[in-house]
Amino acid sequence: MKNNMRQLREKTNLTQEQVAKLTDTTVTYISLLENGKRNASDEMKKKLAKLYNCEVPDIFLALQLTKSKIKKGEWERCHGWKVVNSQRKSM
């Protein structure tokens, strides 16, 4: 099963505040990562992998999954469509 950034954090039972403190960054930055608004540096990917007890490629894939889900939602909002039962419906 693929996980996005938030799911990885929640599996470790950590809050954004705890992750920020443990990675020496801010809650805002962690939130931006989880919402697909920022890219993590290679160093941050290493820190998150260690914290979430996974490999760096898992972090990379989670970031990509987070962004792809957000982009899909943005596309639907911009084009006035909503996907229902695998069919597009106008909003």
Image: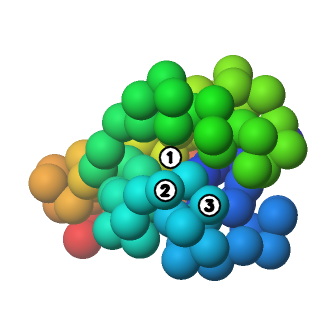
- In the image, 80: left or right of 84? left
Measuring from the top left, give residue 9's x and y in whole percent. Answer: 69, 61
Q: Quadrant of residue 90?
A: bottom left
Asked whether the residues under the numbered discs 3 and 2 touch, taking CB atoms below 8 Å apart as contact, a structural biologist would say yes
Callout 1 amino acid: Thr
Instruction: Identify residue for label 1.
Output: 66
Asked whether the residues under the numbered discs 3 and 1 touch, taking CB atoms below 8 Å apart as contact, a structural biologist would say no
How much space separates mark 3 and mark 1, taking CA atoms? 22 Å
Callout 2 amino acid: Asp
In the image, residue 11 sits, relative to residue 5, either above or below, namely: below
Instruction: Categorize mark 1 by other alpha carbons within 10 Å: few (<14), some (14-19), many (20+).
Output: many
Circle nearer the N terminus (1, 2): 2
The answer to whether residue 68 of the structure is visible from this angle is no
How much space separates mark 1 and mark 2, taking CA atoms? 22 Å
Instruction: Identify residue for label 2.
Output: 24
For the residue pair 20 and 80, the one nearer the viewer reads as 20
Q: Residue at x 72, y 38 (%)?
A: 49
Q: Please tell me whether mark 3 or mark 1 is closer to you in this view.
A: 3
Q: Residue at x 85, y 44 (%)?
A: 53
In the image, residue 65 sits, relative to residue 76, either above or below, namely: above
- In the displayed orientation, state which residue is furthest to the left: 78
The answer to whether residue 25 of the structure is visible from this angle is yes
Q: Residue at x 56, y 53 (%)?
A: 23
Quarter of the C terminus within the rendering: bottom left
Measuring from the top left, give residue 51's x and y in whole percent. Answer: 75, 50
Q: Secondary structure at mark 3?
A: helix
How much space separates mark 3 and mark 2, taking CA atoms? 6 Å
Callout 3 amino acid: Leu
Circle nearer the N terminus (3, 1): 3
- In the image, 41: left or right of 9? left
Measuring from the top left, give residue 38's x and y in whole percent. Answer: 31, 44
